[in-house]
Amino acid sequence: MRRYVINLDRDAARLDWMTDAFRNIGIGFERHAAMSKDQLSAEAISRASGNPGWSRGEIACFLSHIEVWHKIASSPEPYAAVFEDDVHLCPGAASFLADSSWIPPGVELIKLETTLSPVRVGEQKLDFAGHGLVKLHSFHNGSAGYIISRQHAALLANSTEQFDRPVDDFIFDLHKAACWQLSPAICIQDMFLPGSGKIASTLEQGRQDARGTKRLKARQTLSGKLLREAKRLVSKAKGQPHTVIPFSLRPRS
């Protein structure tokens, strides 16, 4: 299974961080040069329709993921893992990233990270190396670590002529595809890991600049929000409790 890390050319320290992280678990990765906000053309910006509060950095982030999806779609391998460049990996992550033989048939999209936010989960599909694969029944934000099938990468890549929401909302759209969650998670962004704060977010300041100090919550279209709320009520009626997907690794010094 190929492993991609999205990294801006100017972020050499982040690349060093990820190189160490993968070296520590004994496997490598392919770097994908992220699109910079300064590289955005008028045409690229126009693709991000329906959300005038977006920062240029968020648009560039989305387009960088699209570029990786095109790579995955053209690869002969059935699955690939995608990471942003500010994550901690758990010591056993290589068991899930070396190959895809553990992934059950029919699973197209697996979230590898946690943001330590309560989410609703359903059935567990397998128990492998001390981790379960559970179905997500509510939105779990973040796009810093996921496994995606070749077919699903092609589907996403070919559905982005226009987009109107951040990349994590687009990827983990529960009313368009089944989304699975590895639990415990094998990665976590530095900004969500309590007591860390080693890596500054490159997107958050841009969000504040674009939207003011209070971040807007226009992450979805109205119809998307209504569908999400409907699913939340169905999950509640089924008795699916909120749970926090755990991550146990301490930050590296």
Image: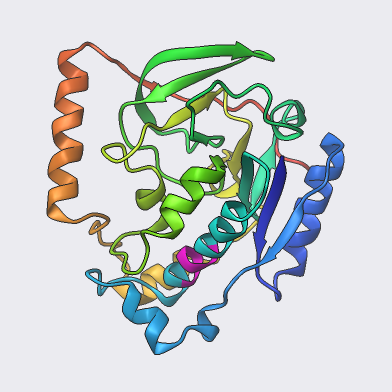
Front-most of residues 215 and 26: 26
Q: Position of residue 202 (x, y in %)?
A: 55, 66
Residue 80 is left or right of residue 223, and the answer is right
In which quadrant will I find the N terminus? top right
- Magenta segment's dominant SS is helix
Q: Position of residue 114 (x, y in %)?
A: 51, 35
In which quadrant will I find the C terminus? top right
Q: Is residue 208 visible?
A: yes
**Colour scheme of the picture:** rainbow
Q: Is residue 196 visible?
A: no
Depicted 175 relative to depicted 46: above or below: above
Q: Residue at x 64, y 25 (%)?
A: 248
Quadrant of the rendered image containing residue 113: top right
Quadrant of the rendered image containing residue 96: top right
Q: Position of residue 139 (x, y in %)?
A: 33, 37
Q: Residue at x 54, y 40 (%)?
A: 149
Front-most of residues 49 and 196: 49
Residue 134 is left or right of residue 86, and the answer is left
Q: Residue at x 22, y 20 (%)?
A: 235
Region of the chain picked out in magenta, as a range: 60-64
Quadrant of the rendered image containing residue 129: top right
Q: Where is residue 203 in the image (x, y as percent from the top left)?
A: 49, 65
